[in-house]
Amino acid sequence: MRRPRHIAAAMNDPQTPLALYVHWPFCVSKCPYCDFNSHVRASIDQAVWREALLADLAHEARLTHGRPLGSIFFGGGTPSLMPPETVAAIIAAAERAWGFAPDIEITLEANPSSVEAARFADLATAGVNRVSLGLQALDDAALRFLGRAHDVAEGLAALDTAQAAFGRVSFDLIYARPDQTLAAWQAELAQALAFGTEHLSLYQLTIEPGTRFATEAAAGRLTIPDGDAAADLFEATRTIAAAAGLPAYEVSNHARPGAESRHNLAYWRYTGYVGIGPGAHGRRGRLATTRHRKPENWLAAVARNSHGLQAEEPLSDRDRATEALVMGLRLAEGIDLARLASEGIDVAAILDEGAVARSATSGLLTRTADRLRLTDAGMPLLDAVLREIVSPN
């Protein structure tokens, strides 16, 4: 599952809710496309992990109190492997430490196995009100290729269970798989949209360094669509989802109006983020926080220091502006330059205005005094546009 790694800005604004990310690093197996901080272990001492996560949470709460939580996101790894009592304990501790905004969103990523689906009712009782389900494909051969442990029937049964247990449901699909035709993806996406969920995360398969797929690609045994074929798939995805009432509000995320992931919007809008657990990143004022990635190293750090921090690095004004630009241009709404400037984040200061003007003339972005955003034509060229418009110094 793909998500942004960190980001927060207005950490001292008492009016803006914080977002809390909780990382559970364990999986039953490692997917060949995944470069996230996930690990397979023969056994896990659940009581030790519960207490360590609570200690890590308490440390961050002492340093970021004064703002309520607007969202909690349990990511991984596979957090649906967490015991529901651990999830409940973390949610309760977070509420005591920060307080909750009235409409708090509490999301948990889940794999669609029957074992994990059996926990959905208990996870809902624990306080989870939104689930993100890693279906990844609606084709059994594709699921085997992606290294998934479930088949289509098991995945759809888990989706039914999730829709009965939670008020809000999203699921992920990966497209642009080897030899996937445009017609095949259009049919698969139409099937996915028929299930009636409020949110879909639709990702093009990418070859990430250090993964098994990277090894296969380097050896010439794996080729994915690129160039015109990938662009056609991207455009079809946006067109079909929008026609079904789920327009793209971010490069890879589609939702009914009002059903966007509020947690992920906190990243993309650069409004506040705390991360706990192995490998979690966060922002505390002008500090970038990083936690130990390896589960055993993180546990040792918590036992030693009562937190899992590995580093706290100061962010320069340019760092903050660059992060806000990189994250905000992912959104269909673009970047609210005026709001960021009011919070001391001057995105305009890092822009090459000549390059911005050229990109606008080319129809790739629009620029006003208060907002910068990519057009539909510019969205698939996000990385190239960013390289072009950022001033070198």
Image (tube, rainbow, N blue to C red):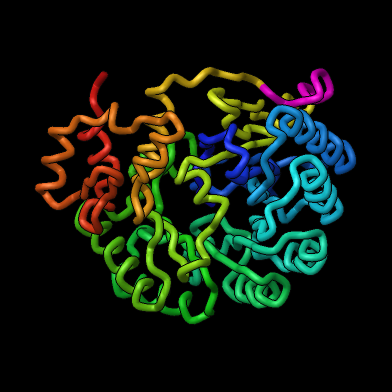
Indicate whether 370 appears above or below 200. Answer: above
Quarter of the image containing the C terminus? Answer: top left
Indicate whether 68 appears above or below 103. Answer: above
Q: Is residue 166 left or right of residue 140?
A: right
**Is residue 73 at least partly visible in the picture?**
no
**Is residue 218 at least partly visible in the picture?**
yes
Q: Residue furthest right?
A: 47
Q: The magenta stretch spans which residues?
A: 300-309
- Residue drawn 47% across the image and 71% down it: 256
Q: Is residue 12 left or right of residue 388?
A: right
Q: Quadrant of residue 324?
A: top left
Q: Position of residue 69 (x, y in %)?
A: 67, 47
Indicate whether 192 appears above or below 134. Answer: below
Q: Is residue 118 magenta?
A: no
Q: Position of residue 192 (x, y in %)?
A: 48, 75
- Residue drawn 30% across the image and 75% down it: 183
- Residue drawn 51% across the image and 56% down it: 146
Q: How many marks?
A: 0
Q: Quadrant of residue 272?
A: top right
Q: Position of residue 291 (x, y in %)?
A: 65, 27
Q: Position of residue 379 (x, y in %)?
A: 28, 52
Q: Nearer the viewer, residue 387 or 278?
A: 387
Q: Is residue 349 left or right of residue 318?
A: left
Q: Nearer the viewer, residue 259 or 30?
A: 259
Q: Is residue 88 left or right of residue 387?
A: right
Q: Residue furthest bottom?
A: 194
Q: Is residue 305 magenta?
A: yes
- Residue drawn 39% across the image and 78% down it: 244
Indicate whether 313 appears above or below 5. Answer: above
